[in-house]
């Protein structure tokens, strides 16, 4: 079985390579990789799990670009923006849109869960007896999350890195954003003496973006491997055990994307939403297959600047911030899981309970890291906010845990679509959107400091 699998994998890779030689656009090849990988995974089952190292290699390749990309695009973006005062309006607009969309997302999640009743008749208590190791792992992760909790003031102070190199090493994105912004501002403030350094950063940004495009050429293969691994090892088991939960989540995310993001892109950014989605497709498929909005970040920035026409200052600041704090798919999910738990445990929710869910789910989605399954463990805190005991919460999460990946993929796709939507809308407001790019033209070169 395993030999046949490798034969099929090589055949598929040859096909994807052939499509590239034939000039099929990248977004179509990534989509082909996604579908083919999924089908191969379903056909081969466990044997397809062997493709994981190829997928991991691809994830490492893009993650390698995160920090260089943020530092170079954000500093040169600051230079292009020219006026430090514009930073304030950019920041305020970004945060307002991020918070607004996330709040709507929680309520869409709650509404869908009220319609689908995914938790009705679910026997969560039996998990403890059958799957002790899962329960033990969740308990452990929950304790670790509790121990790592910092006060709000501490979290704000920690945005200022004490050691920039360490912040970069730890992929502490907010700290790296902070450093890059002040570095860009200092280049501006240094006037003539800063120009040489600004030009170096400009050139470095071009090089890193070129490298990102090189890595993205490999995306169809990486996405194929990831999809065959996930569907091979997890299959569609999620549909058997948590079918209604999965359907409610997928529908809620789709509604959120088409109504909320579609509305923002069409009405506020004034772009064709379907062209926008096509322009972001590499990022969306990468998000779906990696289940990590942080790992997807270089692709998101690349798509925004090269395909949508968002200026570097906006793409380089709004997208990394979004990958860290803006997670609409995650808040939809937390809303649904809360109702799932209430239904399974038999708690009749009151109005104030719903408000508590909305507030804690929004906070948890802001706090969640952009890595696979991040929010699953934060869900325990949300569940205990309205009367589920922590023992019950652990059992409910243990029930979802083995099937979480397919749910995670959809929420991550939504998270990334949200970051891209907000970046594009803010770019329009800040007059940093080059419309010709989406219409098929070449992106205008960023302003080089004169
Ligand atoms: N995996 C998600 C992300 O990276 C976070 C989550 O677990 O909801 O965006």
Image (cartoon, rainbow, N blue to C red):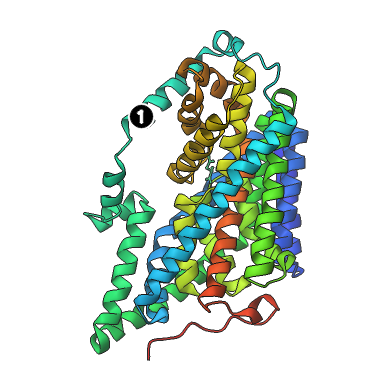
Report the residue at 60% width, 48% height from top: 104
Horizontal relation, residue 314 to residue 263: left or right: left
Q: Where 65 falls versus 38 (above or below)?
A: below
Q: Of all residues shown, which one is farthest toward the bottom? A: 450
Measured as percent of width and height from the top left, residue 193 is found at 23, 86
Tell me if residue 100 can be seen: yes
Mark 1 sits on what residue? 146
Q: Where 97 falls versus 146 (above or below)?
A: below
Q: Of all residues shown, which one is farthest toward the top? A: 129
Q: Is disc 1 placed on a helix, strand or loop?
A: helix
Tell me if residue 237 can be seen: no
Q: Where 436 falls versus 100 (above or below)?
A: below
Quadrant of the drawing holding the C terminus: bottom left
Measured as percent of width and height from the top left, residue 269 is found at 62, 70
Measured as percent of width and height from the top left, residue 266 is found at 69, 67
What number of labels is visible? 1
Q: Residues within 10 Å of mark 1 (few under 14, many from 20)?
A: few
Report the residue at 67% width, 29% height from top: 46
Horizontal relation, residue 364 to residue 348: left or right: left
In front here: 20 or 339? 339
Q: Of all residues shown, which one is farthest toward the front? A: 351
Quadrant of the drawing holding the N terminus: top right
Report the residue at 48% width, 46% height from top: 370
Measured as percent of width and height from the top left, residue 442 is found at 63, 82
In front here: 198 or 258? 258
Report the residue at 65% width, 13% height from top: 123
**Quadrant of the rendered image containing residue 273:** bottom right
Q: Is mark 1 within 8 Å of ligand 1?
A: no
In front here: 264 or 141? 264
Horizontal relation, residue 391 to residue 256: left or right: left
């Amino acid at each position: 079985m395993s030999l046949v699998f490798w034969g099929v994998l090589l055949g598929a890779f040859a096909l994807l390579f052939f499509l590239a030689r034939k000039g099929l656009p990248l977004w179509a090849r990534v989509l082909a990789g996604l579908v083919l990988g999924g089908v191969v995974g379903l056909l081969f089952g466990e044997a397809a799990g062997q493709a994981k190292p190829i997928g991991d290699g691809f994830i490492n390749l893009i993650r390698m670009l995160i920090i260089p990309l943020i530092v170079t695009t954000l500093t040169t973006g600051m230079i292009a923006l020219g006026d430090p005062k514009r930073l304030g309006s950019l920041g305020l607009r970004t945060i307002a849109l991020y918070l607004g969309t996330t709040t709507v997302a929680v309520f869409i999640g709650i509404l869908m869960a009220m319609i689908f009743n995914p938790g009705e008749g679910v026997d969560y208590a039996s998990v403890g007896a059958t799957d002790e190791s899962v329960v033990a792992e969740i308990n452990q992760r929950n304790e670790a999350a509790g121990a790592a909790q910092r006060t709000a003031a501490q979290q704000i102070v920690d945005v200022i890195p004490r050691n920039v190199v360490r912040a970069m090493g730890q992929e502490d994105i907010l700290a790296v954003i902070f450093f890059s912004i002040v570095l860009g501002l200092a280049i501006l403030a240094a006037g003539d003496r800063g120009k040489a350094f600004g030009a170096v950063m400009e050139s470095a940004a071009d090089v890193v973006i070129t490298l990102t495009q090189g890595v993205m050429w490999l995306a169809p293969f990486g996405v194929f491997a990831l999809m065959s691994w996930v569907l091979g090892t997890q299959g569609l088991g999620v549909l058997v055990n948590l079918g209604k939960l999965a359907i409610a989540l997928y529908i809620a995310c789709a509604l959120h994307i088409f109504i909320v993001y579609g509305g923002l892109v069409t009405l506020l950014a004034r772009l064709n939403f379907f062209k926008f989605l096509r322009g972001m497709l590499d990022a969306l498929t990468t998000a779906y297959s990696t289940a990590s909005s942080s790992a997807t970040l270089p692709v998101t920035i690349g798509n925004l600047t090269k395909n949508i026409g968002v200026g570097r200052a906006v793409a380089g600041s709004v997208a990394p911030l979004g990958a860290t704090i803006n997670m609409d798919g995650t808040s939809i999910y937390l809303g649904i899981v809360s109702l799932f738990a209430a239904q399974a445990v038999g708690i009749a929710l009151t109005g104030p309970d719903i408000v508590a869910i909305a507030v804690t789910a929004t906070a948890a989605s802001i706090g969640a890291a952009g890595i696979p399954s991040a929010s699953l463990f934060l869900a325990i805190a949300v569940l205990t906010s309205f009367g589920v005991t922590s023992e019950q919460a652990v059992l409910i999460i243990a029930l979802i845990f083995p099937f979480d990946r397919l749910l995670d993929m959809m929420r991550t796709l939504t998270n990334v679509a949200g970051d891209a939507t907000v970046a594009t809308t803010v770019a329009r407001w800040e007059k940093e959107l080059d419309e010709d790019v989406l219409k098929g033209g070449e992106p205008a070169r960023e302003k080089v400091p004169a």
